[in-house]
Image: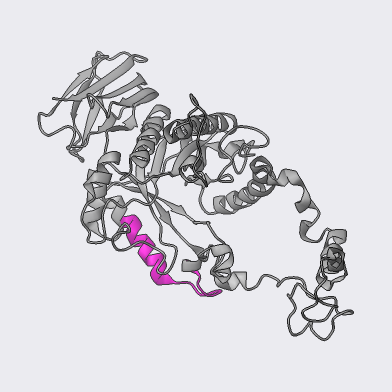
Amino acid sequence: MTTFKMPVKGKYIVDPCGRVRIFRGINGVLKYFPWYPYKAPDPPLLNSTYMENLRNWGFNVIRLETMWAGAEPQEGQYNETYLSKLKDIVELANNYNIYIFHDMHQDLLTSALKGLDNLSGYDGIPLWLFRKFPNCSSYNMLTCPAKVLIEPCIKYPCPFYDGFDSNGNWFFNYFTSVCSNAFQQLYKNNSGAVDSWNPTIFSPYEAGCRNLLPVYNILNAAIRTVDTQTLLFYEPVTYAIDANGFPLGTGFNTVPGGNLSANLSVLSYHWYCTTLSIGLPIPVTLPPGVTLLTTGTTCNIQGDLIFQAVDNDITQTGGSSFLTEFGFDGRTNTGAQQNDYVLDKSDQYFQSWTVWGQSFINESNNIQYDILSQFNRPYAYAIAGTPLFMFYDRNDTHCFILKYTIDLTITCPSQIYLPSTIYPRPNGYNITLTCELSSNINADDPNSIDINTTNSTANGCCAIVIICPT
């Protein structure tokens, strides 16, 4: 078994056979040295047994943190051990037909700000690079020459004495050196200081089109000088996927690199239902007949908007999409409900995903079957035609249904993952096929079945595959 690079065609990632490929997987992120997850309860990505388990559980992709701070901890000095470990992870995953996409994880900029606003801090960029950035504005040398060399970033009270109390006279602030320096930067529009006052820049749409896309264009151009085949994942502002267009959309009117790069571009996005994180500060008594919307209802409304907005975005820009982060506490009813919602919605949109914060093992390296069971479900791994419908009835029959338009120019079979816990081997399920299709167990993966065309299969036929446990 081996993996291979794949382009985008229409909205979907396609393999060399021309089949639409769907991915299900996990995040492999460690935000500190050694910068790759290597032991439980994180995903032990250098453990062959764990990789084999991932494949058997139906997972075929890992979003692997790949950090500049790990690769170049000191300027000009590269950590060959770290790069070698990443290579080992990629090669081990390849042995189990698991794909890797590298993620330069960017929650926070630097550990130098650790403790600020209660943020833990880690090095999104190398610490040596952050230390090259200019310090905060120095004092006006004319008004505070004595202190400028001692404490250049103090806010108050220069030119007033230490401990100066304005006694409520806020206008005294305007006489301080720091304030006059700040106004001087505005007059000069230093580093776009005036531009930063533009209120529209706070909209995710403006941030995407004015800040992110120009940078992504530069990165895309640099990457394509050495690699013209690998998919480039690009992300909007995290909260820019609730709608399309100004002011809440992504702000991307093209993919990075323009329309010619659409076949190698994937919109990466995250979704965590905000109502799960926002609680009422005090008990609320509602009038008779008035009820709050349930978390499930409000999350589902938000989720519906997001999935549709992403679909609309890639219809406009070209390229594919990938839900690279989601995940709720599956041990709570609300969390399990939202996990189920996202998985069902992903099936509806044929959306690939990587779940956040799950390795499905605990600190003792024991499998967490109660959590795994939520994500271990059937799906179409590869579709030899145009996807139309995919559904898994998780609550009642546990039947899986796939519909697609057959394309006889694709000579490879469609492939469906079937978890053995739901569809016991060898005779624990029934398959119903249309269009004179046939089926067999995949030669390389006993957890998957192939759906093959025959001489009697008509091109363009609407294939229906129904698989139910007996």
Depth check: give the residue in front, 185 or 229.
185
Q: Is residue 88 within the magenta segment? A: yes
- Going 52% across and 56% down the picture, which residue do you hit? 107
Depth check: give the residue in front, 424 or 202.
202
Q: Residue furthest right?
A: 142
- Going 24% across and 45% down the picture, which residue do you hit? 370
The total number of labels drawn is 0
Residue 388 in percent (x, y) is at 39, 21
Left or right of 95 on screen, residue 130 = right
Quadrant of image for the C terminus: top left
Residue 283 in percent (x, y) is at 49, 43
Residue 116 in percent (x, y) is at 58, 66
Q: Is residue 76 within the magenta segment? A: yes
Left or right of 161 on screen, residue 418 = left
Q: Which residues are magenta?
A: 71-91
As drawn, 283 above or below 426 = below
Left or right of 334 on screen, residue 230 = right
Left or right of 144 on screen, residue 470 = left
> Residue 128 is drawn in which quadrant?
bottom right
